[in-house]
Image (spheres, rainbow, N blue to C red):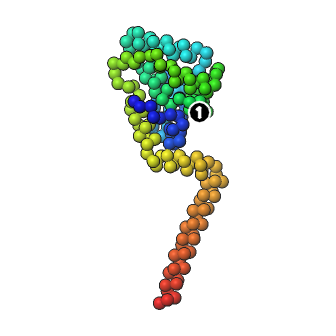
Amino acid sequence: MDSTLSAKKIHNAGVKLKPADINTCSLDITFTDGVLTIPKIKISDITEALYRNIILFEQCHRLDAYFFHYMRFLSCFLRSPMDAELFIDNGIIVIRRGNAEDISRLFTTILKEATQISYSGFYYQTVYENLQGYCNRPWNKWKATLRRDYFYNPWSAASMAAAVFLLVMTFIQALCSILALELVRK
């Protein structure tokens, strides 16, 4: 898995971030129809120690590294404070203490000393590939840019529709003038 995606990049490609229902498993991350659903992550004073202990437990007992993969997947998206802000604003990360910079630091450093011992492939490979495929499609990027820059409120959408309508009417008028001129010449 290469780490070319970030929260900002997937947001710019039109991916919506959505917190999962309360009853879902903490490791259950899904991506369908342009929506990345991640269970809520509560960050407090003990979060880093807890996460490191879970990773260590998986490695010491030679278990499948589901939590390691979870942290690896999230660390791809949370590389900067802006990325962390997107997760906070969308309700995926709930901070009890700290700020966006602390969260990005947590997710970028949590796996530095950990060694990956996995007896199976990357647990989130399918989700990551689908997400990357969605983000690489130009149409999704254009659609997201149009929504974000031109259709962010009803008035801008109405003015854009009026501009398109006037452009079409001008084209029709020019076409009718050309046809009328041809009829007069005959």
Q: What residue type is labelled 1?
A: Met
Q: Residue drawn at (54%, 37%), measured in percent from left and top? A: 8
**Can residue 87 be seen in this snapshot?**
no
The percent coordinates of residue 32 (x first, y second) are: 45, 37
Q: Nearer the viewer, residue 154 or 136?
A: 136
The answer to whether residue 178 is above or below residue 140 is: below
Q: Residue drawn at (43%, 45%), measured in percent from left and top? A: 137
The percent coordinates of residue 122 (x first, y second) are: 38, 25
Q: Residue drawn at (50%, 49%), measured in percent from left and top? A: 142
Q: Residue drawn at (46%, 27%), measured in percent from left and top? A: 73
In the current view of this chain or complex, which residue is farthest to the top?
60
Q: Nearer the viewer, residue 60 or 168?
A: 60
The residue tagged 1 is: 82
The answer to whether residue 185 is above or below residue 10 is: below
In the current view of this chain or complex, which residue is farthest to the bottom?
186
What kind of element bears circle 1?
Answer: helix
How crowded pointer 1 is (Cα within 10 Å; few <14, some 14-19, many 20+) is rated as: some
